[in-house]
Each structure stands twice: as structure tokens, then as C-alpha cells.
Amino acid sequence: AALHTLKDRGLIYPCFCTRKDIQREISSASNAPHGPDGPIYPGICRNINQQEQSERIAAGTPHAFRLKTDIAIAQTGPLTWHDNDAGAVHASPEIFGDVVVARKDIPTSYHLSVTIDDHLQGINLVTRGRDLFPASHLHRLLQALLGFEPPAYHHHDLLTGEDGKRFAKRNKSLTLRSFRSRGFTPAQVKSLVGWTI
């Protein structure tokens, strides 16, 4: 339903690019702009005409859907969001360029899913790691486009190992369970993340 809303407002387009297509285009461009997640999508599929889009979709060509971020920003106007540490933050979703809102393999993206999930669940405070601070700029834009009230945000510091890399489940890093088993108290764990009360 959210994708239909965005489509009806002329804010999304199908992207048929593979990762190789995108990398090749970026490599051939000098000074390709970069965002929080790396090089910004160069807009290869943005201006494909409606007929070609329809033909390629009907033929079963795998595609994602991307947000026309500049047009979306023009429709919403300036936006802000509140972070418990940073205060009022001017939303700058353009740092992501034309971001994917529906992937090729599943009918949504992380960004669209969490925005809708938070709204449906009545979340009024989103707490997540500081590494996701930039994503809040984009989520604020999606909230405005879909008519959702923005929650407040708190982006906590990340726990890192001696190598400076953040702990992550995929790396079998330390977990709360492992801290408990080693005798850490809740206060000690809170201290590790800089939580002062």
C-alpha cells in the first residue's frame, strides 16, 4: 500500500540495474558522489520511458523500486526530527540519492519496512545504534510522504572490540548473555555504552 501511495504521487521508478551495472557506471564517472552507504546510485534507470518500463516488467526482468528523492523533498519541504542527544536535526535525505524502497528479492526495503512498522506499532521513541543515525534522515522523509507522525530518536554509542570494530551478531561478538554469564551487572553494561543515570 505504501509503494502504491508513492507510485501514485510519481515518486518511485523501477530500477533494472545489477550491482555490476551500477559499479561500472560509477567507475566510469569521475568524482562519483558518496553517501553514508558508499557511492550514490547514478540514476541509470531514472529516465527510462513508461513503455519500456512496462515491457521490461511484463517480461519478468528483475527490478527494484527507487525513490525519486529530490522530487520527494520538493513535495514535503524542509523537515526536522528530534534526537535525544543531537536535539532538533534538519533532515537531509538527499545524502542517500535515489534509495531503494522495494528490493528485487523482497517487496520492501529496510528503510520502508522500519518506517511503516514503527508507525503501525505506535513507536514514539526509536532507540538504535549511532551507525544508523544517517538513516533517520531518510526515514523522516518517508514518514512525511506517508503522513506518519515522527517518533523521537535516541542513537546510542556502539560497543567495539579492541580492534575498534563494532560488535555484531554476524561476527559472533559479545552479547548481553555473554556479559551476564561473566558476571557483569546491568549497571556495568550500561556504563559500557555510555548510559549514565
Image: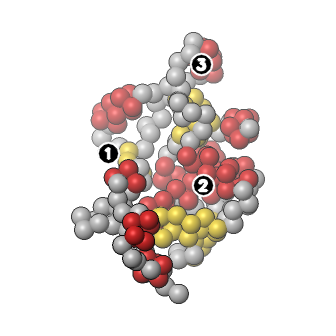
Residue drawn at x 30%, y 33% as measured from the top left = 28
On the image, numbered disc 3 is attached to which residue? 57
On the image, numbered disc 2 is attached to which residue? 139
On the image, numbered disc 1 is attached to which residue? 31
* Mark 2 and mark 3 residues within 8 Å of each other at the beta carbon: no
How far across and how far down the image is residue 78, in percent?
64, 60
Query: Distance of mark 3 from mark 1, alpha carbons?
Result: 32 Å
Residue 31 placement, left or right of 120: left
Give the class, few, some or many, for how many residues have Cα within 10 Å of label 2's Cα (few <14, many ≥20).
many
Q: Number of labelled discs?
A: 3
Q: Is residue 45 above or below residue 112?
A: above
* Label 3 secondary element: helix
* Label 2 secondary element: helix
Q: Amino acid at mark 1?
A: Asn
Front-most of 63 and 182? 182
Residue drawn at x 53%, y 87% as measured from the top left = 197
How far across and how far down the image is residue 157, in percent?
43, 71
